[in-house]
Image (cartoon, grey):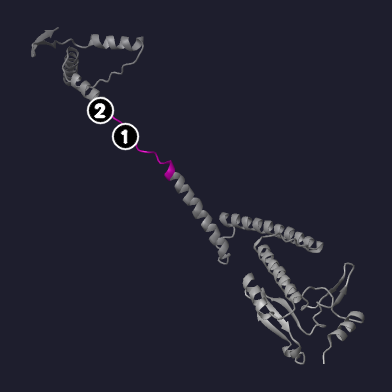
Amino acid sequence: MQHDEVIWQVIRHKHCSYMAKIETGIFCRNPYNVTGICNRSSCPLANSRYATIRDHDGVFYLYMKTIERAHMPKNLWERVKLPRNYEKALETIDKHLLYWPKLLQHKIKQRLTKMTQMRIRMRKLALKTREKIMTTPRRDIKRESRREEKAIKAAVLDKAIETELLERLKKGIYGDIYNYPELEWNKVLDEEKQAAEGVEVEEEEEEPEIEYVEGYEELEDEEDMEDFSGFPSKMSDFNDDEHDSADEEEDDDGEEQVVIHKKGKRDSRKSDDLGKSKKKKKRVIVEMEQEDGDVIRTLRTAS
């Protein structure tokens, strides 16, 4: 038979494993305690008729204990799931604790209110992004720095070796190498292709553009000049006569003479002597007169 007063006297004045005494007061660490304070009305061990609320992964449950199940520790607590809606949860508490003490009902409702507020705050904090400060020991920092320095040196050395080997390969020092690394060889080929494509693109860009310019005026001027030069003149007839007489003289004598005209007094003297030595022949001068669109040619002999 369970006696609540005897249990309380033993727990309070002798020993309780859930009791926590601090400067501000005496508290209870039992998970079924409604208020968390160690006193006669809030102790779940010294009350045969007791009720509380507990949280399991964000879901609230109403726990109830009665004296009729005290002899069955397996089925000592009756559990009822509370809805997420605060008002419906209060209605469920009123329904199951209708004939229970009013003070206990009030404490359970207060616990429900506090736990609901705590759940709301937890959700808000989970949505916020906060900085997390992580501490690293000095040994790890030094070890990482040494590893970085070694890796940088190794990378520089590998790059220098690669460039030197590629230069020697281009110069033809090694001749035909058949076991050359395929990745590096393909990389070099790709770089050469890209360079060639870049040169081709530059050449294509440097091609001159074709421009079209009007040239009718110049052509018309040239045609006018050709038409103008088509008319015969006295000087042209005179020159033609001279050429004809010179050809006749060359045919008669049977000799070919080449005369080179140069600037200076000596050339002019030589040309005068040659002119005197040649035989004077009669030349025909053609005179043209234009009257009212008709052309009249007159022939005149000159000694």
Q: Amino acid at mark 2?
A: Tyr
The correct choice, above or below, for 225 with respect to 90 in the image is above
Q: Residue at x 34, y 35 (%)?
A: 211
Q: Nearer the viewer, residue 133 or 300?
A: 133
Q: What is the distance, in whole Å, between disc 1 and disc 2 at their CAs?
A: 12 Å
The residue where tag 1 is placed is: 212
Q: Nearer the viewer, residue 71 or 199?
A: 71
Q: Report the magenta residues as a range.
A: 204-216
The single residue placed furthest to the right in the displayed view is 14
Q: Quadrant of residue 212?
A: top left
The residue where tag 2 is placed is: 216
Other residues around mark 1 within 10 Å, as few (<14) / some (14–19) / many (≥20)? few
Q: Position of residue 105 (x, y in %)?
A: 72, 75
Q: Amino acid at mark 1?
A: Tyr
The correct choice, above or below, for 208 with respect to 194 in the image is above
Q: Position of residue 84 (x, y in %)?
A: 62, 72
Left/right placement of residue 55 relative to residue 24 reads left
- 67 is within the stretch colored magenta: no
Q: Nearer the viewer, residue 46 or 15?
A: 46
Q: Residue at x 55, y 61 (%)?
A: 185
Q: Is residue 192 visible?
A: yes
Q: Position of residue 104 (x, y in %)?
A: 75, 76
